[in-house]
Amino acid sequence: MNQETTHGFFNAADYFLDRNIREGRGRKVAVYTEYRNYTYNDIQKMAHKSANAFRELGVMVDDRVIILMLDVPQFYAIFWGAIKIGAVPIPVNTMLPADDYEYYLNDSRARVLVMSEQMVPVVSEIEGDLRYIRDVIVLSETKGAHIPFKQMYRHSPSTAKTEFTTKDDIGFWLYSSGSTGSPKGAIHSHYDMVVATEGFGRGVLNLTADDILFSAARLFFAYGLGNSCYLPFGVGASVILNSEPPKPENVLRHIERFRPTVFFGIPTLYGQILGYLEKQDKQNGATPDPGGPHQFSSVRICCSAGEALPPELYHRWKKRFNIDILDGIGTTELGHIFICNRPGQVKPGSSGKPVPGYELKLIDDEGNEVPQGEIGTLLVKGRSAAQQYWRKREKTRSTMQGEWINTGDKYYEDEDGSFWCAGRADDMLKVGGIWVSPVDVENCIIEHPAVNEVAVVGKEDDKHLIKPKAFVVLAEGTEASSELEQDIKQWVLDRLAKYKYPRWVEFVRELPKSATGKIQRFKLR
Ligand code: 3UK
């Protein structure tokens, strides 16, 4: 057994946060927001106060802390503060309905919930059903049943002892959803963040302490957590935080004000930004000049992930700004991006080449590697991979095969070693970079009184991006109408996370089924 891994001290909060101060960056700005800037000293002080406050509450090594927070600087205090004492932060999507939170909180058996004030109404709906949460901390000044963040702070000392942890200690979890079953908690180690920072951050993006990073993907996503948390902290750079939903207007406002050098987006947003600027041009009768001054002139690299970037978007962006968008694929299980295009060598439409630190394998249904050019299932090997899924033995065994992680993605490799995405092995859709399970949406629509049968598939919108479409067989005696179509959309909007609603509803007489009666979604696609 490797002595260093088992016994050597390694704590990610020490490495990613405290090391910056030891190396003399204490007075450097770590975080820019529209309200104020935070130096590394400021963030360290906040994190140490949270660490002490957690200890005060009786939070122990390996205890879970669920984070339901907007992208605000206090996120770092909670995330690094928990890790510092060996506790395990679990950032969760803040856009979900109450039932989902009941699942996350009970499944993880988190002891503490830390949330932004905006989350209080939705969480109150389920508070009675939370079996394991003992303390709820709310980021607000108003007093109530919860411990307000400010109060927890005031009494805590601003230096904290670091728990003795090792590289393989559990550092954080992120939940990942699949086509069937409940979301799975992917358990990551402290050191996984170092592997991603070295391989992707330094190896692909050449990040240095001079960079200013800005991510439109929020901190609770694996992509955003890397972009806005451990990548900038890992190289001693600065990060811009935007607590509002990433719409073109406020994203551009932040870019123009803080002048980032690296920008992280998802395909939908690149399309929205272009659309927004093109509309402005039309109103002003202006023609863009890529040689002239523009909003993205400080940016040396743009990244895209979450779903494939359509080549058309890449070209429109390149034409307007003369900046490459590097498309790269990452997963929650691998932590961050493991295949990516390289600056100056982009192959539009491809995911690029393996990131340093990762090995790839494309296999057929028998588990044999496919010849170059043929489509196979993508397996990835790399030291940032999650150890296992929490309490999901079968899913762990089928996804985490020894050193290899099965991504469930279909890929092929071309003659110069670039990898091309060819769809999924299951029916899962990526909508705006976030998983949508067709089964989830179908289960909601089927409850509608007018619906007899339903199947949901992905359909490309006018920007070549995938959105859910529902095929509906109506109940006996119900007439198809545009009002009913609207009503079904609203039905889903009222019950599930917004991005899941079907953008189209098509009424059909019957659905294609296999001999065993299983709906054949691939035929509808
Ligand atoms: C799909 C892509 C084509 C693919 C993520 C960057 O998206 C991330 O993680 P998730 O666990 O989803 C993983 C799945 O999403 N996918 C992601 N990126 C691409 N497909 N081209 C892409 N560029 O199906 C993959 O299996 O939500 C993205 C960094 C960290 C991440 N976790």
Image: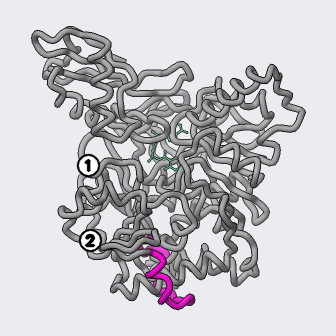
Residue carrying label 2: 133
Looking at the picture, does residue 1 appear above or below residue 126? below
Q: Is residue 159 magenta?
A: yes
Name the side, left or right, on which 313 lies relative to 52: right
Looking at the picture, does residue 12 appear above or below residue 218? below
Amino acid type of the residue tagged 1 in the rendering:
Ser
Magenta residues (range) = 149-171
Q: Nearer the viewer, residue 259 or 324?
A: 259
Residue carrying label 1: 182
Quadrant where the image shows the N terminus = bottom left
The crowd level at tag 2 (other Cα within 10 Å; few <14, some 14-19, many 20+) is some
**Scheme by which the image is coloured:** one colour
Rendered location of residue 295, percent (x, y): 78, 41
Looking at the rendered structure, the secondary structure element under dot 2 is loop
Name the side, left or right, on which 268 lies relative to 287: left
Rendered location of residue 351, percent (x, y): 59, 37
Q: Is residue 161 magenta?
A: yes
Toward which corner of the image does residue 73 lie, by quadrant?
Answer: bottom right
Name the side, left or right, on which 23 lies relative to 377: right
Amino acid type of the residue tagged 2 in the rendering:
Ile
Toward which corner of the image does residue 23 lie, by quadrant?
Answer: bottom right
Looking at the picture, does residue 294 appear above or below residue 481? below
Q: Is residue 1 visible?
A: yes
Looking at the rendered structure, the secondary structure element under dot 1 is loop
